[in-house]
Image (cartoon, rainbow, N blue to C red):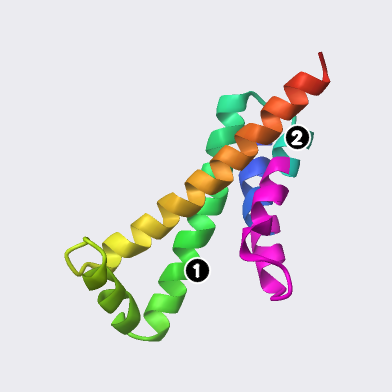
């Protein structure tokens, strides 16, 4: 149950921080670390909760933006990158990148908690 709550909190706080344009885009890393710090879970579960929460959020937001412009921008960016022009590969890459950032931030928060309790 804590794992599901952690996934939801990672996604919710990353989305909430991203709503405000005066904040830097990377501020969700701090929220992922804070969520993992306060939700007592193992470092592996914390990493996967951060990875799934932020990765799903980024992939979902990228898909929404992509559908809004009929895949025009993402297809052109996918041609620039070595993705073979596949907008789907670009969305997956976006989700994996966001997931790794959220996962490693959560892992850091979990390790900080384990060091502070010793």
Which labelled disc corresponds to residue 108?
A: none
Task: Tell me where residue 22 appears, x and y as whole percent.
Answer: 73, 74
- Residue 37, label in figure: 2
Where is residue 47? Give x, y as percent: 56, 35
- Which residue is rendered at x = 65% and y = 34% of the image? 108
Residue 116's image quarter?
A: top right
Q: Main secondary structure of the magenta part?
A: helix
Q: Earlier in the sequence, mark 1 or mark 2?
A: 2
Q: Nearer the viewer, residue 109 or 44?
A: 109
- Say which quadrant the C terminus sits in: top right
Q: Position of residue 111 (x, y in %)?
A: 68, 26
* Residue 1 appears anywhere in the view: no
Q: Answer with left or right where residue 34 lies relative to residue 18.
A: right
| Front of the two marks 1 and 2 | 2
Q: Return the residue nearer the eye: 74 or 65.
A: 74
Image position of 47 with respect to 21: above or below: above
Horizontal arrangement in the rendering, residue 24 relative to residue 66 (left or right):
right
- What residue appears at the point 62 percent right and 41 percent down from the top-left corner? 105
**In magenta stretch: residue 24:** yes
Label 1 element class: helix
CB contact under 8 Å: marks 1 and 2: no
Quadrant containing the N terminus is top right
Residue at image mark 1: 61
Q: Is residue 111 magenta?
A: no
Residue 36 percent coordinates (x, y): 70, 37
Which span of residues is magenta-colored?
13-33
């Amino acid at each position: 149950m804590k794992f599901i709550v952690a996934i939801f909190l990672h996604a919710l706080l990353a989305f909430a921080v991203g709503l405000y344009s005066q904040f830097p885009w990377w501020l969700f890393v701090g929220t992922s670390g804070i969520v993992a710090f306060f939700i007592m879970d193992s470092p592996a579960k914390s990493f996967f909760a951060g990875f799934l929460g932020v990765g799903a959020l980024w992939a979902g937001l990228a898909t929404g933006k992509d559908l809004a412009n009929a895949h025009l921008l993402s297809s052109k960016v996918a041609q620039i990158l070595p993705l073979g022009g596949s907008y789907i590969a670009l969305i997956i890459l976006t989700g994996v990148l966001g997931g790794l950032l959220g996962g490693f931030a959560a892992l850091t928060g979990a390790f900080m908690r384990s060091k502070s309790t010793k």
